[in-house]
Every structure is written in C-alpha cells, then in structure tokens.
Amino acid sequence: MHTVQVETPGGHYPIHIGAGRLDAVADSIPADATAIAIVTNTTVGALYGARLRAALEAAGKPLLTIELPDGEQYKTWESLDRIFDALLAAALDRKAVLVALGGGVVGDICGFAASCYMRGIRFVQVPTTLLAQVDSSVGGKTAINHPRGKNMIGAFYQPLAVEIDPHVLATLPAREISAGLAEIIKYGMIADAGFFDWCEAHVDALRALDDQAIRHAVRRSCELKAWVVSQDERESGLRAILNFGHTFGHAIESGLGYGQWLHGEAVGCGMVMAAELSARAGSLDAAAVDRIRALVSAIGCPVDPPGLGADRWLDLMRVDKKNEGRRIRYVLLPALGQAEVRAVDDDVVRPLLPGTAQS
Ligand code: NAD
Ligand code: MG
C-alpha cells in the first residue's frame, strides 16, 4: 500500500492506495465514531456495497446504507435531502461518519452532506471511478448542481481519509477509463514533464488496467493534486492550473448538451485546443502540441473539437469562473510540465474554434 499525505488548512489526511483497500476501510473509521452511513448509488451499491458493509462490520458500529439513483442528474438538493432524512430517521449524531462509495457524483454529494449535517460530521472517500480516484476525491471540493449551473451549491470540506482500491476499476466501462486517463495525463502536462513521458510509454498498459501501471499513475496524480491543493486549498491562485483544458472542455459539454461527451472526453479535446492556443499565444513548441494530441488520442479521447460556431464557443467560455470581466482567461503551457493562467484576446482564439454550417 502507498500513502500520499494531503496537508491543507482545512485538514490533514492520508490517501491510501492499494489492492484490497475496499476490504480495509474500517482502518479509517475513528474509534469514537458512533455509527457509519455508507452513501452510494444503485450501480456501485450492487457491485461493491455488500463487500464494503462486510469490511465495515469490523469497526463494530451501527451501519446504515443509503442508495441514491445513478447519474449526474441526481446530483441535486433532493438527493441531499434523502441523505439527511435517512440520517435523522436513524438518529445519527455528530460523531457518526459517512462513507462515500462511488464516483465523483456520489463523492461530491456525500461530502457536501457531511459538511452540513449537524454543522459538519466526518466522512471517508472510497472512490470507484478512475476520475474520482485521481481527481474528485482529493482536495475537498464538494457540491451539488443547481438547475442554473453545475456545482453551484457546495463547500470546501476535507475528508478524514481517501481509500483507493484500483481493483474496483475492473467493472468500469472503457469510456470511463479513457475519461479518467485524460485527468491523469493533465497532471503531466501542467506539472511534471517526466510523468508525461511515462504516460506516453505506458498508455497501452494504462488502458488495459495493468496493476502496476495504474497504481503508479493514480499515486503520481494524487501526489501532484495534493501538492497543488496544499498550496491553494480554496482556488485563489495556483489551484486554477488544474483547470487546464477545462475552459474549452466545459464549452463542449454545455454546447453539445451535458452527457453527450463525458467530462474527461471534453477535457481531453479541450487540452489539445489549449495546447494549440499555448503555441499560438505563448511559447509552447509545435512538437509538444503534437505529442499532446497524440497522447489524448491514444488514451481514447476525441481530439477534434465539435463545430459550435466561434461566437457560441466564446459565449460559452465567457461564463467560466476564472474570468474577470469579459476577457477570457485560459490555462496555458509555457512548456510541457509548466502552466500559467492568462487572458487571451478573442481574435487570437477564434481560428481554433470550428464553425458550423449555420454560423
Ligand atoms: P460518476 O460518479 O457519474 O460515475 C460514472 C459512472 O460509473 C456512473 O454510472 C457510476 O455509477 C459508475 N461507476 C462508478 N464506479 C464504478 C465501478 N467501479 N464499476 C462500474 N461502474 C461504476 O462520474 P465520475 O466521472 O466519477 O464523476 C463525475 C462527477 O465528479 C461530476 O459531478 C463532477 O462535477 C465531479 N467532479 C468533482 C471534482 C471535485 O474536485 N470535487 C473534480 C472532478 C469532477
Ligand atoms: Mg475535470
């Protein structure tokens, strides 16, 4: 087992990475916990709920399971209320511990529920998608969606621990693996050129979920994310570099309608576009852009942006949280392995934005 330590003002906690961690989650339940509530969804609950329950019985506490419907469309106030209803019906007190078993949707809702129930109770993340293992379970962002926007209602709230068992990825659909790999290669592009080289060399092993390759990639990704959030827990500066590819990616997701492309697929394509912009508006060399496009394609993500029309692209990108005023700010790569956030004039970006017959 590997341990990566996360140190933020909001909490210090370990990320445990290793085969069999699903059966050892009781290690992360504090002795003074009065009860444990597992929050999961119907899909993940059916696959791993019984195993986790059996493992948690070792903690010797009253145990409750709350199963939500599966899907981003249920990342809502209603789901949050279902959790509160179940916790109150079982009379769980402030020393109860929540355990999030699932992907980013379950982790984000459960974390937010933990941040509000009785003004805050402890929780443990057990991420079961590749994206959740390398991204959403680490760093303490929790949220639900509002009809007017994704992740609009939430809190920064750090877990007690993150328990990552790479073996649970065996049941994940291939598209979800590709989407998680997009966030993994992102860390190499923005912060560790050596890790980018390693990803290029191990892309087949990663897609095949080779044990050693996945363990290394998850560990390095968690280390890099932990390093970024330890310096900027609440995204007042450095943390924004984690949004590399996301300005274009979010425009793809909302322009095509959420759910058409997976988030990681949109980010994959968005990273190719952001690399092209880094060459056009900055100092990234053409060879690095080619390597980024080739790696995004090799992990199984699309590299050709959809035709939304340049004006629509720009409108969609103007709603990004990084912006100040009307100028759009982008995460750019001065070189492979380095990132900076900078505003770029629309005229420089336009040639990268494919139009449609209608536009
Ligand atoms: P998800 O949680 O919807 O999971 C994807 C699908 O895989 C779901 O159908 C899920 O039921 C299924 N699944 C999960 N684990 C499985 C397994 N082991 N085997 C088979 N199926 C499994 O999606 P996601 O990509 O994990 O997370 C996306 C969410 O994460 C979004 O809501 C996004 O806003 C959020 N997010 C949060 C952060 C953060 O910092 N908090 C960062 C990135 C993304
Ligand atoms: Mg992302």
Image (cartoon, rainbow, N blue to C red):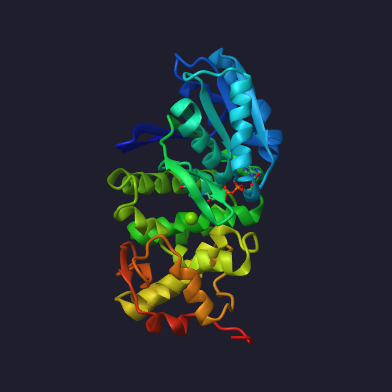
State the image coordinates of residue 297 (x, y, percent, origin top left): 55, 68
Front position in the image: 316 or 141: 316
Residue 54 % position (x, y): 63, 21
Please, is residue 284 above or below residue 178 in the view? below
Residue 251 visible to an observer of this rendering: yes
Q: Which residue is drawn at 47% across and 20% down?
A: 94
Quick check: 224 left or right of 91?
left
Residue 306: horizontal and vertical position, in percent? 59, 75
Q: Where is residue 201 drawn, in percent x and y?
A: 46, 60
| Quadrant, the N terminus | top left
Q: In this view, does 238 lie to the left or right of 55?
A: left
Residue 245's place in the image compared with 83, above or below, is below
Question: Split into 4 quadrants, where in the image is the C terminus?
Answer: bottom right
In the image, residue 7 sits, relative to residue 172, either above or below, namely: above
Which residue is pictured at 63% across the width and 86% down the height? 358
In this rendered view, identify the residue nearer to me: 96 or 300.
96
